[in-house]
């Protein structure tokens, strides 16, 4: 997917993000390989793009702590443990 046409990405809330981070095969020590997480890694690595999260959508970021660690974030109160465990600054 070519990201040149994007200016940013806003992830929706609700439980869709939990489903989008699902991966069929899990290997210890391997980063999450779900297509949405791979896409989000590319977005977050591109300094021209902005990323936003609504409600439970930070679950997608939590699938790879490198995406959230050390960032100041807001979140739905019932996922605070997930965000803190991924290193987000709440």
Image: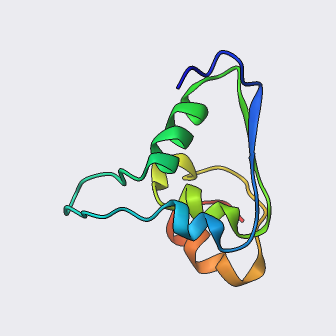
Quarter where residue 13 is shown:
bottom right
Vertical order, 37 against 82 (above or below): above
Quadrant that contains the C terminus: bottom right
Vertical order, 25 against 41 (above or below): below
At a point 59% along the width and 35% down the height, the residue shown is 44
**Is residue 87 in view from this perspective?**
no
* Residue 53, x across and y down, in percent: 75, 54
At a point 71% along the width and 70% down the height, the residue shown is 56
Q: Nearer the viewer, residue 49 or 24?
A: 24
Q: Nearer the viewer, residue 38 or 48?
A: 38
Vertical order, 50 against 38 (above or below): above
At a point 65% along the width and 15% down the height, the residue shown is 4
Vertical order, 33 against 48 (above or below): below
* Residue 3, x across and y down, in percent: 61, 22
Question: Is 68 on the left or on the right of 12, as rendered?
Answer: left
Which residue is situated farthest in the top direction here? 4
């Amino acid at each position: 997917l070519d990201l040149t046409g994007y200016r940013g990405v806003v992830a929706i809330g609700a439980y869709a993000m939990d489903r989008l981070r699902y991966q069929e095969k899990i290997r210890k020590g391997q980063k999450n390989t779900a297509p949405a997480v791979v896409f989000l890694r590319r977005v977050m690595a591109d300094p021209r793009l902005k990323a936003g999260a609504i409600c439970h959508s930070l679950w997608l970021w939590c699938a790879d702590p490198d995406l959230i660690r050390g960032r100041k974030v807001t979140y739905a109160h019932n996922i605070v443990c997930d965000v803190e465990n991924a290193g987000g600054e709440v």
